[in-house]
Amino acid sequence: SIRGGARVSSIEKNESGKYTVSLDAASEDEVGDTIECDAVVLAVGATAAGRLAASSPALSSLPATRDFDKLRGVTCVAVRLFLRPSGSISSNLRGGSHSKSQLPPDVANAMIDSPIAVCGAGIGNIEELDEAGFCIYDLQRMHEEWSVDYYANNNVPAEDQLAVIEVDFFRADAFVDLDNDGITDLALRAISKALGTSKIDQSDIVDSTVLRARNAVSHFAPSSASYSPDVKLEKGVYFCGDWIDRSGHASWSTEKSVVTARQAASELSTDFGLRRSRNEVIPAATDTPQLSTLRKLARLLRSYRPPSSLPPSPWVYAKQLLSGQFDP
C-alpha cells in the first residue's frame, strides 16, 4: 500500500529477521503506523539518511552508516513559471527533444544551443545570488505535453497553451524564506541577467509554483564521496540516490539516482530469489574525443605543475595555467 505524506521515523530489525518501519502520522488527525517487511529500499537524500540512521537501530548498527552524521545538504528552491505564449514561435532551436518555443523571442534565442542554461553564483550583481547558482530550463523543449508540436497536433486552443520556464536555485539559504512573489521576481531577474534579455513581465505569468528544499539536496564536497555507501548495506537494507556509490558507472545527479535504484533492485532480487525483475543498467556513454583530450590534458598539467590550492575546475585550471593567469 502507499502511505502518502507519512514520514519514516525509525527502522528496527526484529528477531525473525524482518524489518519494522515506524511511520509518523501524515496529519494531526491521524495516528502513526508501522509496516513489517522483508526488505527496505531507502530512496532518500543524504541528510535524511543521516537523520534516519541516528534514530534506527537497524541502520546505526551497520558499519557503512558510521559517517552518515558527516553528510551535508544544500538548500534549493525550484520556480516553475507558466507564461502566456509569445506572439511568435521561435524555431530551429537545438539540443532539446523539441526545437520550438513560445517563450519571449529574446529568451528563446539566448538559449538557442540548449534548453538548459547553467549559471554560477554572483551573476548580475544580484545580492541574493551572491552565493547561489542556478539552472534555467525551457520546458517546452523538454516535455512533450508542453511542446509546440503537441499543441498543434492535438488542436489545443490558443487560450489553453502555455510557455513554461523553470529556474532551480542551489545554495539558496539567503532567500529561501522570501514569499512566493519575492522568489518569483528573483527568478525573473535572474533569467534576465543571466541571458542578457529583457525581464519577463509579471503580467505574462498565468500560474507559478515555488518549491523549497532546506538542506535537502546532496552537498558534494572534498572527501564527501568517502562517506557514500554501496547500494547494499546488508541483505534486506538497500540505498539509492545521487549520493550512493554506483560502483564505477559514470553517471551523476538524476541519472545516478536511477542507476543506483536499478542496482539496488538487482541486489534485492538476487538476495530474495526474484527472477522476473527488470533492473538492467544501461552502460554510460564513453567520453567524446574532445572530453577525453581535456581529461588527459588536465592530468598532465596537474602532474607537471600541481596547484597549491584547489582550482575552480580542471578545465578552468588548464585554461588559466596555459594563459599565465594562474599562479600555483
Image (cartoon, rainbow, N blue to C red):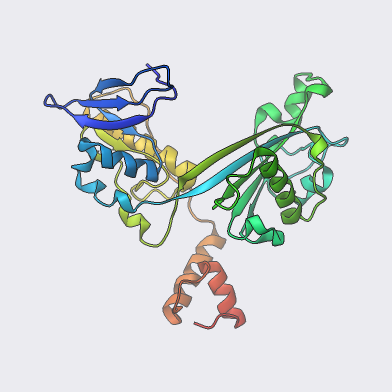
Compared with 44, 294 (above or below) is: below
Q: Is residue 226 left or right of residue 100?
A: left
Query: Toward the viewer: 322 or 139?
Result: 139
How many marks overall?
0
- Which residue is depicted at the point 23% across and 24% down? 38
Q: Is residue 147 left or right of residue 310?
A: right
Residue 92, picture quadrant = top right
Q: Nearer the viewer, residue 171 or 24?
A: 24
In this picture, residue 231 sits left or right of residue 168 = left
x and y, in percent, of residue 246 in the image: 36, 46
Q: Residue at x 31, y 38 (%)?
A: 52
* Location of residue 1 (image quadrant): top left
Question: Based on the displayed image, in which of its 4 quarters is residue 193 positioned?
Answer: bottom right
Q: Residue furthest right?
A: 87
Task: Name the spot of residue 59 as percent of width and height, x first.
Answer: 23, 39
For residue 290, say whether it is visible. Answer: yes
> Residue at left 36%, top 55%?
225
The answer to whether residue 94 shows anywhere in this view is no
Residue projecting furthest to the front: 28
> Residue at 29% of width from left, 36% of height from top?
238
Residue 73's place in the image compared with 280, above or below, is below
x and y percentages locating residue 133 in the rendered image: 60, 55
